[in-house]
Image (spheres, grey):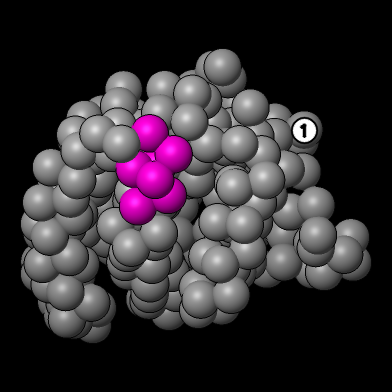
Amino acid sequence: MTAVVHTRLVHDTHRRASTVLAEAAADPAASGAALAELRDFLVVHLDSHHKSEDDLLWPMIEEQAPGAAEPLTRLSGEHDQLEAALEALAAAPIDQPGRTALVDAAVAVRDLVHAHLENEEPILLPALSEHVSEEAWEAFVRQVRATTPGVGAHLLVGFLDQVGTPEDVEIILRDMPAPVRAKLREEAQETLGRLTRRPADPPGAANSERRPGP
């Protein structure tokens, strides 16, 4: 189902991005400008993602199946923890010697993201499969796209390529013209290459964050 594949792919993007930031922040060779790009991307997209769940997705699931969203609503308390951690990450200086504050904040966000998704997915993915139609999901996605700030679009494309198959990535990027995708992929390769000691993974490459589809 589109909703399940889409959600897994977005979640794996968040896992991957938070992991790369935590590792790169501790690497003295990582570019400060590239760290700022990734930090800003992660803060904006995680904040927007969690708000879209609380404000749009949980009510949609509850409307279709009363009571089904109640366990998810309880997990929204973890969104509050993540929001506080994201505020600390956004405020952490990048040019500080040793980047101690940035490293601590990035590690905290990474750990919270991974733990939260492990708690959320066993509840959310079955609910999406059982209670959300293709039409309802497309309407939700349109609302999210209309309200998500366009920060770090190149990194979104770059991380999607790392965690998903070309077929899965097409589900999310199908409305993006091919020349735009190609340009964003080049930009992502350049930014990620300044964060890591190895070249960024090519499109469709498997990695440790990759999980099997439904």
Dominant secondary structure (helix, strand or loop) of the stretch shown in magenta? helix
Q: Residues within 10 Å of mark 1 (few under 14, many from 20)?
A: few
Q: Amino acid at mark 1?
A: Glu
Label 1: element kind: helix
Residue 21 in sight here: no
Residue at the image position 54 percent from the left and 31 percent from the top: 4
The image quarter in which residue 183 lies: bottom right
Say if 214 sits above or below 48 in the image. above
Range of residues picked out in magenta: 59-65
Residue under numbered circle 1:
167
Q: Residue at x 80, y 63 (%)?
A: 176
* Horizontal and vertical percent position of residue 25: 27, 60
Residue 25 sits above or below residue 62 on the image: below
- Measured as percent of width and height from the top left, residue 109 is found at 20, 54
Q: Quadrant of residue 117?
A: top left
Location of the C terminus by quadrant is: top right
Q: For residue 149: magenta?
A: no
Question: Is 117 above or below relative to 97?
Answer: above
Residue 1 image offset from top left, x and y in percent: 63, 27
Viewer-nearest residue: 207 or 67: 67
State the residue at coordinates (48%, 31%).
Answer: 131
Q: Where residue 209 sits in the image (x, y, percent)?
A: 44, 30
Residue at x 53%, y 36% (from the top left corner): 132
Q: Do we see residue 159 in this rendering?
A: yes
- In the picture, measured across the screen, residue 95 lies left or right of residue 188, that is left
Q: How many marks?
A: 1
Is residue 62 covered in magenta?
Answer: yes
In the rendered structure, the answer to whether residue 179 lies left or right of residue 162 reads right
